[in-house]
Image (tube, rainbow, N blue to C red):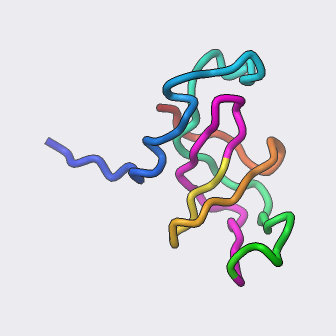
Amino acid sequence: MCKSTVNPIALTSQALVKQSSHYPPSWRGKVPRKVIIVITVHPDMPFLAKPGTCAHGGEEYYVTVNSHGAVAAILPDGERLGLKPYEFEVTEWH
């Protein structure tokens, strides 16, 4: 039996429990588990983030998703970085 290597933080997505009326209809109730970053993403407010916080373009990240469909990448150090819809493509669903 294979042991799951899913980031445990990804399993805490609020959207797995409840989805609001604002949840993206194109996802048809599915919840993203992993995304690939299309362009390198930096925090909107870098002065509030750890130095060097970013999600690199071309790399895959586990994500958390809130009940409204907002997506945040889980970085290797455990930090979360909010993503805009044009910054990622879903590669794996829960």
Horizontal and vertical percent for residue 18? Answer: 56, 22
Relative height, residue 77 to residue 31 (above, below): below
Report the residue that reaches farthest toward the left: 1
In the image, 3: left or right of 57?
Answer: left
Relative height, residue 56 to residue 66 (above, below): below
Horizontal and vertical percent for residue 52? Answer: 70, 82
29 in magenta: no
Quadrant where the N terminus is found in the figure: top left
Horizontal and vertical percent for residue 90? Answer: 64, 39
Dominant SS type (magenta):
loop
| Magenta stretch in the rendered image | 51-71
Horizontal and vertical percent for residue 76? Answer: 51, 69
Quadrant in the rendering for residue 20: top right
Q: Could you tell me which residue is drawn at 62 percent across and 55 percent down?
A: 73
In the image, 5: left or right of 55?
Answer: left
Q: Could you tell me which residue is drawn at 66 percent across and 50 percent down?
A: 72
Q: Could you tell me which residue is drawn at 64 percent across and 29 percent down?
A: 67
**Foreground: 64 or 34?**
64
